[in-house]
């Protein structure tokens, strides 16, 4: 997030983030399969509220989930407790992933950055740095995975700053109806997209409440992801175009990179 909101707003934005992700992105089976294959402890960077970290821990993996946003981490810890994740199975760590050096660095069997979070590292150097953090935490033979959205020309043409209604949803936490509107502005000079999300929560007869978040995403190509992985000393094993690991090609909407630390 570009601006650091005060704690009550940050907590609301963490709750609304989960509401936004009620539509399952469909990536969990891939991460479960990679964690099974790696057969050792798992590190998720930019883990948010634990959408993936919780089910990985519930499936029996030893998981460390890192995020720099205290409200996301707090919500992740609460969700883990409510879901009955054994406390020694999942550790949330509040930290910036850039330059991160956990005590267990060099010992993880699987480390990953899911669902476009690499794009929140909004410069080339930061994205390269994120791959260095992944590589530094893997044991020899360990696996890394990074997943990034590849917007096409039609997507970019829509990113002209206009505000569009994205959804109305009922928040299961509060029972209130929340409406999300968003705007995106593409800057070709920096290859970034400035995103604004406006959430409004309303109940009959009460004034609406509104929260706004701003993020900057740096677009990244599959080639660039592969180059970052190689720079970090990883060997690219698969560059896929989706979570089913189908080969990437013209029209692929995402790049899913799987690499190994030699
Ligand atoms: C898209 S959300 C999380 C997604 C989560 N991996 C999932 O798949 O549901 C991105 C997260 O990245 C975190 N983040 C962004 N930059 C970060 C950084 N430099 N270090 C750690 N976390 C970061 C944000 O706080 C946010 O929670």
Image (cartoon, rainbow, N blue to C red):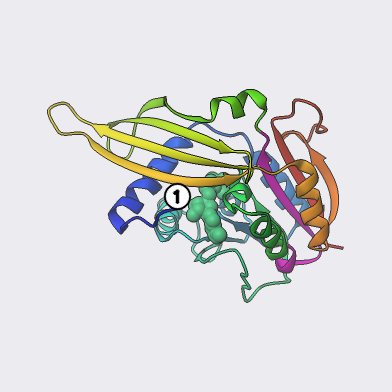
**Going 31% across and 58% down the picture, which residue do you hit?**
7
Q: 82 above or below 104?
A: above
**Going 35% across and 53% down the picture, which residue do you hit?**
10
Q: x, y percentage for residue 181? A: 39, 30
Residue farthest toward the front in the current orientation of the protein: 189
Work out whether residue 86 can be spotted: yes
The residue closer to the viewer here, 85 or 218, is 218
| Dot 1: element | loop
Q: Which residues are magenta?
A: 135-150
Q: Is residue 173 left or right of residue 140?
A: left
**Going 72% across and 70% down the picture, which residue do you hit?**
107
Q: 1 above or below 23?
A: below
* Quarter that holds the C terminus: bottom right
Q: x, y percentage for residue 58? A: 56, 51
Q: Is residue 124 left or right of residue 20?
A: right
Main SS, magenta residues: strand
State the image quarter where residue 231 is shown. Answer: bottom right
State the image quarter where residue 166 is shown. Answer: top left
Circle 1: is it few (<14), some (14-19), or many (20+) Cα within 10 Å? Answer: few
Q: 5 above or below 21?
A: below
- Asked whether mark 1 lies closer than 8 Å to ligand 1, one says no
Q: x, y percentage for residue 93? A: 51, 66
The residue closer to the viewer here, 55 or 139, is 139
Q: Is residue 56 left or right of residue 225?
A: left
Work out whether residue 50 can be spotted: no
The residue closer to the viewer here, 136 or 23, is 136
The residue closer to the viewer here, 108 or 83, is 108
Q: x, y percentage for residue 220? A: 69, 44
* Magenta-span inclusion, residue 16: no
Q: How many marks?
A: 1
Q: Which residue is mark 1?
A: 83
């Amino acid at each position: 997030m570009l601006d650091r909101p005060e704690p009550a707003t940050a907590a609301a934005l963490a709750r609304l983030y989960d509401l936004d992700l009620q539509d399952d992105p469909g990536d969990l089976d891939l991460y479960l399969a990679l964690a099974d294959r790696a057969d050792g402890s798992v590190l998720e960077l930019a883990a948010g509220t634990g959408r993936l970290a919780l089910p990985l821990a519930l499936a029996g993996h030893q998981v460390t989930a890192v995020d720099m946003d205290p409200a996301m981490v707090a919500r992740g810890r609460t969700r883990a407790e409510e879901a009955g994740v054994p406390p020694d199975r999942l550790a949330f760590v509040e930290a910036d992933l850039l330059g991160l050096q956990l005590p267990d660095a060099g010992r993880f069997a699987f480390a990953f950055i899911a669902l476009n979070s690499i794009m929140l590292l909004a410069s080339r150097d930061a994205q390269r740095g994120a791959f260095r953090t992944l590589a530094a935490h893997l044991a020899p033979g360990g696996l890394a995975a990074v997943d990034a959205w590849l917007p096409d020309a039609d997507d970019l043409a829509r990113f002209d700053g206009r505000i569009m209604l994205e959804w109305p949803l009922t928040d299961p936490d509060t029972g209130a109806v929340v409406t999300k509107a968003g705007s995106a502005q593409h800057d070709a000079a920096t290859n970034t997209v400035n995103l604004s999300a406006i959430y409004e929560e309303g109940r009959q007869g009460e004034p609406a409440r509104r929260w706004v978040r701003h993020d900057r995403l740096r677009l990244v190509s599959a080639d660039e992801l592969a180059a970052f992985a190689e720079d970090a000393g990883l060997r690219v094993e698969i560059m896929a175009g989706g979570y089913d690991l189908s080969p990437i090609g013209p029209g692929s909407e995402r790049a899913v990179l799987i690499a190994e630390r030699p």
